[in-house]
Amino acid sequence: MTVLDKVKPVVSKRLLGKSKIPVSEIGLACDLIGREFGVEENMRAFSVLAAADNCGINFWDTADVYGNGLSESRLGAWQKKNKGSRLVATKAGRAKELFPDRHQYDRMRRSIEGSLERLQVDSLDVLHLHRLPERILRSEQLWAWLDDFKRQGLIKHFGACVDTVDEALSCIERTGLTSIEVVINVCHQKPAEQLFASARANDVAIVAREPFAHGLFSPVTVTSTPEQKKAYSYLERSRLQQRSMLQKIKELVPEGMTLEQMALRWLLDFDEAVS
């Protein structure tokens, strides 16, 4: 018996926007679950899912393109053998059949059906539109499709994963929208200043992307694309400027806390946020 078997830390729950579903306030980003880990790849992936279950982390975030479907497949296999009250949010819209400008009703429907098959479910808990071009995101037709998919029972709830506050604001008043994924962290506080009041007024949950500033708060080196550098100002800085900024943030970490813990605590002080 391990220490984790004796003591099971439980993550607090929050309601996910209009869905009113209680989910863990700290979620599990499942992009890495779709990575190749070598000979013991499935064992390593499943050990992460087991640890999440052990801690009461029941909000799992994935996408059809993570590992070209491997992330969803692993989640589906795990859930089939390990029953539990989890909410799995997946994404659609960036597969090669759709992105950047081939979004059509039948293709979106096939994309959803592929996720259903891999996750081994009859209906998706939450479907997030996955960082679509803004002109498509503003299309009335696109949102009508989501309403239709919901009426058909293919999805239970829907939201959007976006890059900018402007994109988030263009979605937030959509009828039925339950959540928005957007980058927000200690280094990128613009959404907290401009978005949270509107989210509260429209009963929309904010799912915080990049809580550790794209690896800035972590010893792991993360490669940034030109698109990401343009979207997140802290990535535009030189390595020297980033280190200087990081040092100033570290000086604010309360005694007894790690930098990562402070970063999460800062986010969770907003009632609208799920990290």
Image: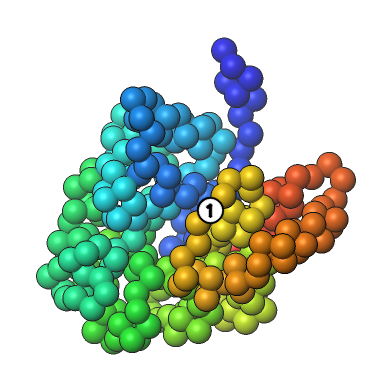
Residue depicted at x 46% and y 65%: 225
Give the answer, above or below, for where 21 lies relative to 199. Answer: above
In the picture as drawn, the residue positioned furthest to the top comes out as 1
Residue 89 placed where, x, y %? 38, 55
Q: How is the image coloured?
A: rainbow
As shown in the figure, which amino acid type bears the numbered disc 1?
Val
Identify which residue, 263 or 19, lies in the foreground.
263
Give the answer, above or below, for where 204 lies relative to 165. Answer: above
- Local secondary structure at mark 1: loop
> What is the total number of numbered labels drawn onto the structure image?
1
Residue depicted at x 75% and y 64%: 245
Residue 242 placed where, x, y %? 69, 63
Tell me the quarter of the picture where residue 266 sits.
bottom right
Residue depicted at x 74% and y 49%: 259
Residue 229 placed where, x, y %? 53, 71
Q: Is residue 231 left or right of residue 238?
A: left
Identify which residue, 96 or 109, lies in the foreground.
96
- Which image quarter holds the C terminus? bottom right
- Which image quarter holds the N terminus? top right
Q: Is residue 49 left or right of residue 272?
A: left
Residue placed under numbered mark 1 in the picture? 222
Q: Is residue 146 left or right of residue 10?
A: left
Q: Callout 1: 10 Å neighbours few (<14), some, many (20+)?
A: few
Instruction: Tell me if residue 26 can be seen.
Output: yes
Give the answer, above or below, for where 200 lies relative to 268. Answer: below
Instruction: Tell me if residue 274 can be seen.
Output: no
Residue 187 placed where, x, y %? 68, 66
Residue depicted at x 35% and y 44%: 34
